[in-house]
Amino acid sequence: MAASSAPLVRRNPDDLIVGLVSVSDRASRGDYRDEGIPSLLEWLESALVSPWQSVTRLIPDESAGITETLAELVDRQRCDLVLTTGGTGPGRRDVTPEATLAAATREMPGFGEQMRQISLQFVPTAILSRQVAVLRETADHAALIINLPGQPKAIRETLEGLKGQGGARGVPGIFAAVPYCIDLIGGPYIETREGIVKAFRPKSAIRPPRT
């Protein structure tokens, strides 16, 4: 998948453009290898059937810079979906949620609520997580922006959910609702691999399967 500072060219109307942002002071300085963006790229590669491209950003925990990056990804790069990782705890340098809200036109609180429900299956400290999801809308474009956890395992669990015993449905992941949300804001039609995460749409919104 492409990662470039120049605006990407949408190859067809259903070509999803995803912005991936890892927020970390130390990783952005090169003190250690960033794991957030590689984890997101790996998961998207496994989960998406429909075509997609990515734009990546590794930035420090600076509120103004985070807001500016999110705005640039939506307004200039024309991302339909932006996923951030890092900076959502209660630490003094954790400012990703506030910076995300500053870039928003509307909040989508259900995503944050569900992310905490998933994480609470593992650790009681999940209540300290402050992830938010928002829409950023301009006159001719809109995007969904979601804050995700910082750890690769938590990223995967949050996106695809938890399976019950014998593979039965457990706790739904948040990505199940992402394709229909993108539909509703005028973005491309996203198809997923059901073995990873099944996109939910009303019957009236489902297209025939891609061949």
Image (cartoon, rainbow, N blue to C red):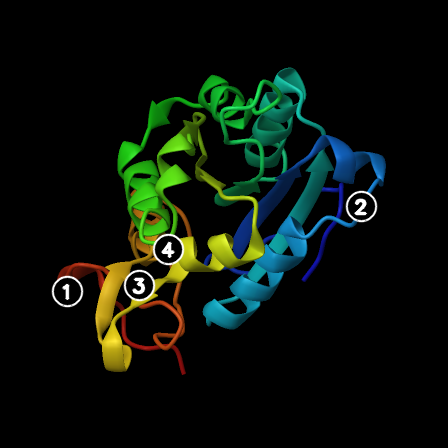
Give the side of residue 6 with respect to residue 11, left or right.
Answer: right
User: Is disc 4 in contact with disc 3, using a CB cutoff of under 8 Å?
Assistant: yes
User: Is disc 1 in contact with disc 2, using a CB cutoff of under 8 Å?
Assistant: no
Q: Position of residue 191 (x, y in %)?
A: 39, 67
Q: Nearer the viewer, residue 13 or 19?
A: 19
Q: Is residue 154 above or below residue 59?
A: below
The residue carrying mark 3 is 199
Q: Earlier in the sequence, mark 1 or mark 2?
A: 2
Give the side of residue 66 with respect to residue 102, left or right.
Answer: right
Q: Circle 2: is it few (<14), some (14-19), or many (20+) Cα within 10 Å?
A: few
Q: Is residue 93 above or below residue 156?
A: above
The residue carrying mark 1 is 203
Q: Earlier in the sequence, mark 2 or mark 3?
A: 2
Q: Earlier in the sequence, mark 4 or mark 1?
A: 4
Q: Callout 3, which amino acid? A: Ala
Q: Nearer the viewer, residue 81 or 133?
A: 133
Q: CA distance from mark 3 to mark 1?
A: 12 Å
The residue carrying mark 2 is 32
Q: Quadrant of the N terminus?
A: bottom right
User: Which residue sits at x=26%, y=59%?
Assistant: 171
Q: Callout 1, which amino acid? A: Lys
Q: CA distance from mark 4 to mark 3?
A: 7 Å
Q: CA distance from mark 4 to mark 1?
A: 18 Å
The residue carrying mark 4 is 175
Q: Callout 4, which amino acid? A: Phe
